[in-house]
């Protein structure tokens, strides 16, 4: 995802740069221009819809009416934004900064999570960063697609994807270089290479009740329980030594190297 920033790319060049970036492999664009006068939003959004239509998803930051007016594909909201009711058919992207926020966003009906800040960036040069550990923490508890943002470049995008993200969201990595299209191609190549490596290494090994199991890919805990034909109305699960609450089962992904104890609970008070 390419997030716009008129301080790096003037609005008069934005549609051209976005079009070139989409042609180079960008598959989603978020229009985000804090402080832009209301009278300028609509023509900019229309231009971006024109160059992305049929080629890349267009998200509008926080403005339901504008998204509807230009036929955008989705809306993006900040982590603490309440979020208005979206017209039917619009995707909802949500900024998050923690595993807890990811779970809350998923319960609220988000379709996509934009997770940051991963690395020091132009907008957060000295702020707290989570790196790939944050990606792993979030993708462990959420089944939604996750894009990593914050200081992401072609050099580290592969690590973000390898940690569990489905892709990345960037501003400076594409808009700051002299040749944005070339930068977009490098970023696309890094993400695609990491995805290919993930597919080739999709088999995982986990230990369940002391027995080694080989699975086709990371999968939700309920799917593993069903695959192992463990049927019982009350099941207790410990993942890597931590007992999970019942309401955590559905959102937990089992990954390579995990150790699980699954127990059928019997009896009662």
Image (cartoon, helix red, strand yellow):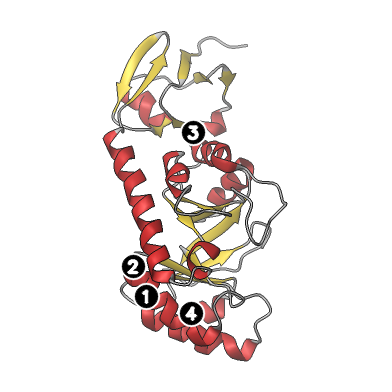
Residue 225 screen position, x and y as percent? 38, 24
**Label 1 to label 4: alpha-carbon separation:** 25 Å
Horizontal and vertical percent position of residue 186:
38, 58
Please give the residue where the numbered disc 2 appears in the rendered image: 24
The crowd level at tag 2 (other Cα within 10 Å; few <14, some 14-19, many 20+) is some
- The Cα atoms of the two marked residues, 4 and 3, are separated by 34 Å
Q: Are marks 2 and 1 in contact (CB under 8 Å)?
A: yes
Residue at x-position 59% and y-position 57%: 95
Secondary structure found at label 1: helix
**Residue marked by disc 3:** 252
| Residue 71 showing in the rendered view | no
Mark 3 or mark 1, whichever is nearer to me: 1
Asked if the residue at tag 3 contacts the one at tag 4, i.e. Cβ–Cβ closer than 8 Å, the answer is: no
Q: Decide if residue 23 is in sight here.
A: yes
Q: Secondary structure at mark 2?
A: loop
Residue denoted by label 4: 68
Label 3 – label 1 distance at C-alpha: 39 Å
166 shown above or below 231: below
Q: CA distance from mark 3 to mark 2?
A: 35 Å
Q: Is residue 87 above or below residue 238?
A: below
Q: Which structural element holds mark 3? A: loop
The disc label shown at residue 173, or none:
none
């Amino acid at each position: 995802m390419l997030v716009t920033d008129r301080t790096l790319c003037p609005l008069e060049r934005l549609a051209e740069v976005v079009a070139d970036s989409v042609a180079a492999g960008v598959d989603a664009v978020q229009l985000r221009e804090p402080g832009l006068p209301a009278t300028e939003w609509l023509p900019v959004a229309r231009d971006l819809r024109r160059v992305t239509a049929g080629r890349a998803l267009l998200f509008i930051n926080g403005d339901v009416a504008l998204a509807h007016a230009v036929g955008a594909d989705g809306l993006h909201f900040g982590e603490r934004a309440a979020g208005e009711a979206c017209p039917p058919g619009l995707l909802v992207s949500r900024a998050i900064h923690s595993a807890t926020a990811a779970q809350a966003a998923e319960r609220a009906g988000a379709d996509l999570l934009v997770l940051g800040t991963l690395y020091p960036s132009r907008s957060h040069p000295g702020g707290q960063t989570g790196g790939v550990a944050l990606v792993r923490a979030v993708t462990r508890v959420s089944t939604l697609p996750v894009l990593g943002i914050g200081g992401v470049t072609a050099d580290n995008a592969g690590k973000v994807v390898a940690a569990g993200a489905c892709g990345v969201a960037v501003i400076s990595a594409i808009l700051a270089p002299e040749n944005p299209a070339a930068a977009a191609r490098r970023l696309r190549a890094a993400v695609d290479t990491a995805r290919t490596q993930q597919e080739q290494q999709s088999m995982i090994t986990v230990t369940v009740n002391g027995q080694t199991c080989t699975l086709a890919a990371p999968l939700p805990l309920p799917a593993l329980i069903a695959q192992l034909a463990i049927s019982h109305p009350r099941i207790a699960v410990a993942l890597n030594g931590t007992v999970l609450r019942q309401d955590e089962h559905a959102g937990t992904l089992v990954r390579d190297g995990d150790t699980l104890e699954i127990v059928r609970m019997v009896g009662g008070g």
